[in-house]
Image (cartoon, rainbow, N blue to C red):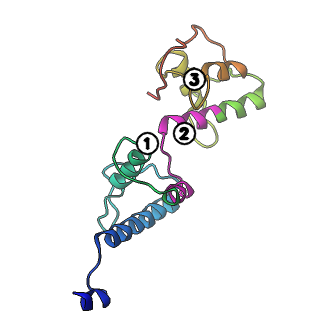
């Protein structure tokens, strides 16, 4: 066995695992290069049959602690480099709030028509309409702070102020 191991015929489970991780990382990197994001559908498989969607979701779940496993700081940094979004709700909030800020600075208000779409394709008017109708819940604490107060600080006008005890949602 030692002679076989020396010639490279025997590979440890750890080595196989590292090779698999490297392969999947490269597949994720290719997907990001082609699509500009890592929003990979769960059932997505690469052309050569790798279940990239499942692997990406597993990495997110391990990172958030929802699935047992270990992600080293190095692996987390590498995934972040290629656009891994671990919290989709937070990511969407940041995108839309940023678009609100841009609109506000250009127009000095948030009187955005419901059909307004930003130059990069965000349905900003619909998003604000859904918030005002209560279909998207805003948080009053957490990573994004008080989302209601942040929108109010740039001029949102409520017909009926949202429930400040509601949980964050993106529906």
Q: Main secondary structure of the magenta part?
A: helix
Identity of the residue drawn at 47% across and 21% down: 167
Give the image quarter of residue 112.
top right
In the picture provided, is 154 more to the left or to the right than 68?
right
Give the number of the mark in front: 2 or 3.
3
Q: Is residue 5 above or below residue 125?
A: below
Q: Secondary structure at mark 2?
A: helix
Write down the residue under mark 3.
141
Report which residue position mark 2 lands on.
91
Q: State how far apart marks 1 and 2 are (Cα).
A: 15 Å
Residue 142 appears at what percent x and percent y?
A: 56, 28
Indicate whether residue 95 is drawn in magenta.
Answer: yes
Front disc: 1 or 2: 1
Q: Earlier in the sequence, mark 3 or mark 1?
A: 1
100 vs 134, left or right, is right
Q: Circle 1 sits in a helix, a strand or a loop, which is it? A: helix
Extreme-left residue of the structure:
1
The image quarter in which residue 13 lies? bottom left
Kindly state the secondary structure of the residue where label 3 is placed.
Answer: loop
Q: Percent x, y for residue 154?
A: 72, 23
The residue range painted magenta reads 76-97
**How many labels were placed on the picture?**
3
């Amino acid at each position: 066995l030692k002679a076989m191991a020396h010639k490279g015929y025997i590979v440890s489970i750890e080595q196989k695992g590292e090779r698999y991780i490297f392969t999947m990382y490269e597949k994720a990197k290719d997907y990001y290069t082609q699509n500009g994001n890592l929003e990979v559908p769960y059932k997505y498989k690469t052309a050569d049959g790798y279940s990239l969607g499942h692997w990406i979701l597993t990495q997110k779940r391990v990172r958030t602690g929802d699935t047992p496993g270990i992600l080293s700081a190095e692996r987390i940094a590498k995934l972040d480099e290629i656009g891994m979004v671990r919290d989709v709700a937070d990511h969407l909030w940041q995108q839309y709030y940023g678009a609100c800020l841009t609109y506000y600075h250009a127009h000095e208000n948030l009187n955005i028509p419901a059909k307004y779409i930003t130059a990069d394709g965000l349905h900003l008017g619909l998003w604000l309409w859904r918030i005002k109708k209560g279909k998207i819940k805003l948080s009053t604490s957490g990573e994004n702070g008080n989302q209601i107060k942040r929108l109010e600080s740039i001029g949102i006008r409520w017909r009926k102020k949202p429930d400040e005890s509601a949980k964050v949602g993106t529906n």
